[in-house]
Amino acid sequence: MAAPQRPVPQPPHSAVWRWPLLAALLLVAAATAVAVWLHRPLPLRLQGQPVIDVVIEPGMSAAQVADALVASGVEAPALALFAWFRLSGQARALKAGSYEIAPGTTPVQLLDKLVRGEQALRRLTLVEGWNIRQVLQAVRGADDLIDDLPPGHDPVALARHLGLAAAHAEGRFFPDTYLYPKRSPASRVLRQAAAAMDARLAQAWSQRQPGLPLRSPDELLILASIVEKETGLEADRPLVAAVFLNRLRIGMRLQTDPTVIYGLGEAFDGNLRRRDLLTDTPYNTYTRAGLPPTPIALPGWASLQAVVQPAASRALYFVARGDGSSAFSHTLEEHNRAVRRYQGNR
């Protein structure tokens, strides 16, 4: 006769649920720790700077981005950052660029910045009436802009370096304010300004009045640069443009001082003398008929518009009144009287 089997001892009821509960508590604790970490400011190695700079190169993986952040001064484990990028589901949405990470930035805010592509931007303003020397001076003095341009201020070398369609860079950049990421190459910003000028020039050329004595958008740009330098008064621009267009129609020389000054270059000392007006250069519109060979400055949109939509005037002369405005005349006799009246004491 078989011996009766002894019942297998069962663990206490509390032991059955102890381990799952412990695991659940650990998961809750881990989730809480992660949540706290995600919303806590990241420690940064500032090294005396107000922010840290991070450059994310195109094609970087999420792991490489995490490594770049740590190498730049984010004091957090690269593995933790990479895990956060992956768990967020946005690891492939990180955008290349130049970023500033400020104190107080949390991992959540950091990811949002990288996904949105909120780069550290700087600004460069090009002003109406500037010549190429002034443009390059502003570019080379701009914050966090890498000077990758040819040395000096040769407009031909600059045009070649930038790959412009024109052989001469003078006047080829639209005057405006341009935003660029930190440590951008200067050539990229100037190409953007050149593209903006090309677009505005094409727009103005398409709006030109019929019968203008201009053969191409380039001639429009040249004349607009002269109008830009001859007056800063908005109301006078269409009239100034009309004077020069009227002169071109009848073959009369433009006789405008700003072109002479441009032709003198660095030899100009601020005082335009009679001998300067008689010294022949390609830009001396007293000694040569027609337009000069290139623009002499950056024309703004108002000057481009003035040339393609000039005032309905037959005036051939104008003289500065001394208050920023000009007096316009149809005949030389009228002009001479205006000169005596407004500039007799000069």
Image (cartoon, rainbow, N blue to C red):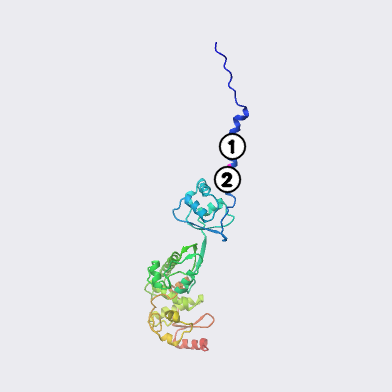
Q: Position of residue 146 (x, y in %)?
A: 47, 65
- The answer to whether residue 177 is left or right of residue 37 is left
Q: Residues within 10 Å of mark 1 (few under 14, many from 20)?
A: few
Q: Residues within 10 Å of mark 2 (few under 14, many from 20)?
A: some
Q: Nearer the viewer, residue 281 or 315?
A: 281
Q: Is residue 235 above or below residue 107?
A: below
Q: Is 340 one of the magenta-colored residues? A: no
Residue placed farthest to the top in the image? 1
Is the residue 163 above or below the residue 333 in the image? Answer: above
Disc 1 to disc 2, C-alpha distance: 15 Å
Q: Is residue 31 magenta?
A: yes
SS assignment for the magenta stretch, majority: helix
Figure check: 225 above or below 48: below
Q: Which residue is mark 2?
A: 34
Q: Quadrant of residue 217?
A: bottom left
Residue drawn at x 47%, y 88% as measured from the top left: 336
Quadrant (top left/top right/bottom left/bottom right) for the N terminus: top right
- What x and y, as percent, mark residue 205? 41, 70
Judge whether residue 218 can be spotted in this image.
yes
From the top left corner, tell me how far across and down residue 71 is, in percent.
51, 54
Instruction: Decide if residue 131 is in sight here.
Output: no
Identity, as a three-letter code, of the amino acid under mark 1: Ala
Magenta residues, start to end: 30-35
Q: Which residue is mark 1?
A: 24
Q: Amino acid at mark 2?
A: Val
The residue drawn where x is 61% and y is 30% is 15
Q: Identify the element where label 2 is drawn.
A: helix
